[in-house]
Image: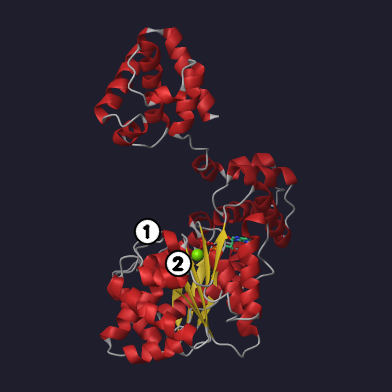
Amino acid sequence: HWSRICSRLQAEVGEVEYRTWLKQISIGPVDGDEITLNLPTRFLRDWVRTQYGDRLSALWNAELPSIRRVELQVGRPDPVVEPEGASGDEAGSADVAPVAGTVDERVAEARSELSRHDLAAPLDPRFTFDTFVVGKPNEFAYACARRVAERPSSPGFNPLFLYGGVGLGKTHLMHAIGSELTRGGKVSVAYMSAEKFMYRFIAAIRSQSTMEFKEQLRSVDVLMIDDLQFLIGKDNTQEEFFHTFNALVDAGRQIVVSADKSPSDLSGLEDRLRTRLGCGMVADIHATTFELRISILESKAAASGVPVPAKVLEFLAHKITSNVRELEGALNRLIAHANLFGRPVTLEATQDVLHDILKAHDRRVTIEEIQRKVAEHWNIRLTDMSSARRARAVARPRQVAMYLAKQLTSRSLPEIGRKFGNRDHTTVMHAVARVTELMERDSAFAEDVELLRRMLES
Ligand code: ADP
Ligand code: MG
């Protein structure tokens, strides 16, 4: 159970956050409906309690319905006592690499949830409109989400389709809509991932309760399905979703869907479903800008109460550009260190504490950049990188570019070959060998190549 909860948490909060906080938890004894979790220090216990307490309870309860409370305490890991009904082979330690549940386990879980009649996954109370930082890249999606939360099922806004890359706030906005709507208590909202939708559907089929499942789904005022791309290739579930979708929209209920791509780009989803998904409002969350990353960091730092110098925030916003979740994870780790050791956050400490994350975010060089720099350096045309010309003045730089592409990117030989005018992978292999050999023989040439490499890496 615990390893399943761990893998869930890891997926939800991201690797960095998981490793900083949650990996330190060890499970203790179960007493009636309560399970004890141990953390090594008081600070960690308090932090985990405030940040993850509710989520931990919810996950434990979903795993083992008999557990209703999670007690967090400071202490050494107790000898593992698995709750009743647990299989003995599952070690309780969080250090054991978590394994994702099998389909059967997930279906069984979905079935037990179905029988408890709670259709919706719980909404995360931290994901509200108030905590969502608005900037150019997300202002449209935010405005649409707000609008749906104010007046669900308005013409033109149904369905609301939110899309964008990983960690840019889709789930956050959906939860915000849900929380806003359920606050009054009059609107029933069901939020679940597309994955959950599928496992519930399968569970319903296996327990011959599809009618109930459909009725449950069709009785909500607002249905939100997160990460719809999961349904690609799952034709039966798509079909079921399509019918649910139509039934709800026809009955004047609101649908909110998220995915990593726009409806038209979700190839692999049935055409009629894609068409209907694009019929309402389609809102794109763009990649973050530097300004937005700074605003988000400022807001999260302020909420933490730990002073973080502007220089540090700028440094993070420069380094971690892909995903708000990781940005948040990095900041949380800094704050944790400051708290643990009672030291102020400084740029130096940041580089130290985040060493591993920063390394992973070192700028990746593209083959196009390599080609451009190399062409500039030897003063040849960029198009000659992919041309068929064999003159040495052109062929040699081209070989260097292939060599650097192999050294500085994770591309395979065939992939590199393709970028150089569809050349064969053996040509790339030959270029790498040739440049290596030349560098050994000709120190001036070696210096040139090294200089290019340093320029590209900085
Ligand atoms: P997605 O579902 O698009 O992958 P999430 O909604 O899970 O992304 O967001 C990842 C994390 O980043 C969450 O903790 C979320 O609160 C945070 N986040 C993303 N965008 C923003 C934003 N604009 N303001 C504040 N927090 C954000
Ligand atoms: Mg999400």
Q: Residue 215: percent from the left, percent from the top?
A: 41, 91
- Location of residue 265 with respect to 403 vertically, above or below: below
Mark in the foreground, 1 or 2: 2
Residue in the image at 33% along x and 77% along y = 239
Labels 1 and 2: the sequence-earlier one: 1
Which quadrant is the C terminus positioned in? top right
Label 1 to label 2, Cα distance in Å?
25 Å
Res 201 quadrant in image: bottom left
Give, as a three-letter code, the residue at label 1: Ala
Quick one: quadrant of the N terminus?
bottom left
Which residue does the image show at 34% across and 18% down from the upper left? Answer: 389
* Residue where numbered disc 1 is placed: 97
Q: Are marks 1 and 2 in contact (CB under 8 Å)?
A: no
The residue carrying pointer 1 sits among few (fewer than 14), some (14 to 19) or many (20 or more) residues within 10 Å by Cα, namely: few
* Image height of 146 relative to 17, above or below: below
**Residue 335 in the image: x percent, y percent?**
65, 54
Query: Can you tell me whether the CB of the residue at mark 2 lies under 8 Å from the nearest atom of ligand 2?
Result: yes
Amino acid type, residue under disc 2 in the picture:
Asp
Residue where numbered disc 2 is placed: 227
Q: Secondary structure at mark 1?
A: loop
- Per the image, label 2 sits on a secondary structure element best described as loop
